[in-house]
Amino acid sequence: MKSSKLKFSRSLTGSAFSRYFSFSALYVAQGIPEGILFFALPAWLAMNDKSPVDIAAFIGVILIPWSFKIIIAPLMDRFTILSMGRKRPWVIFGQLGLILSFLSIGFVPDPLNNITGLMIVGFSISFFGAFQDVATDGMAVDVIPADEQARANGLMWGTKIIGTSLSLVVGTALINSLGFTTAISLLSIAVAIIMIVPIYFTERPGEKIMPWLKGEANTESEASQLKSWAEIIKSLYRVTKLRSSLIFVVISFVSGILFGLMDTLLPIFTIQELEWTNTDFSQFFSIINVVAGIFGMIIGGYLVDYFGKIKMLTIYLSLITAVISIFAFATGLWSNLIFLCGFMFIYYVLNIFLCIGIFASGMQLCWKTVAATQFTLYMTLSNMGRASGSALLGILKDSYSWEIVFVFTALMPLIMGVLVQFINFKNHKQKVDQFKVLDHTLVAPHVIED
């Protein structure tokens, strides 16, 4: 086992190093467009005096495709080119669409006065980003062993945040100096280069690199591939209705509201309320997120592995509630740069740690038979919450002060902290272990209610 972690292998099942490298690279590819869509463009629009309602509407629209993931995941579980792996063909397709759609946003005419055009192309980028994300997560659930999941999630989220942050600061600088079209075109090159990773690495030994090359389906892939829609639906229903899974469904949605509120709130708040420039925001945001991402890669997964998921989630959520609440009531210190920067730094470090804990928890609750679809269900609900949170900000800000908006936001981690206490991983696993699959037909005992 130790040697497999150190050696290099062209197949993801053959080496931990290959898994960590490949999934980190694929998450960087997701982070680059997200840095532009979710942060650089909103900050640029705010800098050019677009209203919070327009900016929130833009973010709300580009988040919608992430709610489609639950439709995409069963499609990937049902159909694939097994000789190339269960999820790898879909990863390649999603990455290609992400490259082309990301490049196209640079050609939106008069983008400052064409929010509709930005929404349409942004929607397309998000669609392929979500597509690539579903395939990548599904492949991760298939090939990453349980004892590597927390560390892998730390690396994946850390590299994604670094990709998001670097694309934000570099993208903002390029937009301001070279113009919108040139900036996006240059960043598209980085996303295109990462296409080499899913093409080069296979899921398992002996599989085809491309459809026209030599190779064959792995027997393990053939055995785990679901053969009908009925199997997918019945299996997903059976595992999702267990109590711990249902609780996690609610937690996923509420976490999305928290992320959507904060990600939309901060660029508008700092630029329009505190009179920062979009360059100020992008540079500071990028620095603290790179640092936070490094913390996540180094110790984020380790803390979850060592102390346990429930304990660390409780600590993270309690601290986030306290940090946002303190900031909400410290209005006299908002103009203090050290206080503001300290708040944003602490929040984003905790945010990354929270994401790592949530992802690792979601993977542990998954039943291997429908793990990709089940995990995608959780993430879809989170993204639905994120879109709701972004749209909600415009409504809240029209009716209430920034103090009330921050207080409302602080309620989200508080609710999650209460709910997480009712998750029981051991009990959930016992229920899942009772499920039996014989000849691809689900057979389970009657005593399965959680």
Image: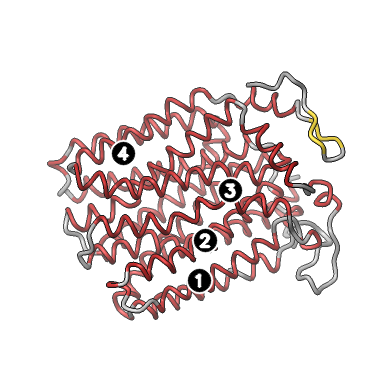
Q: Amino acid at mark 4?
A: Thr
Q: Which mark is residue 70?
A: 3
Q: Which residue is mark 4?
A: 409
Rounded to the nearest angstrom, the CA distance separating label 3 from label 2 is 12 Å
Q: Which residue is mark 1?
A: 101
Q: Amino acid at mark 1?
A: Ser
Give 239 or 363, whichever is nearer the viewer.
Answer: 239
| In the displayed structure image, the side of residue 388 where residue 201 appears, left or right | right
- Say if 40 sits above or below 312 in the image: below
Rounded to the nearest angstrom, the CA distance separating label 3 from label 4 is 26 Å
> Is disc 1 in contact with disc 2, using a CB cutoff of under 8 Å?
yes
Tell me which colouring the rendered structure shows: secondary structure
| In the displayed structure image, the side of residue 327 where residue 320 appears, left or right | right
Rounded to the nearest angstrom, the CA distance separating label 1 from label 3 is 21 Å
Q: Which mark is residue 127?
A: 2
| Label 3 neighbour load within 10 Å: few <14, some 14-19, many 20+ | many
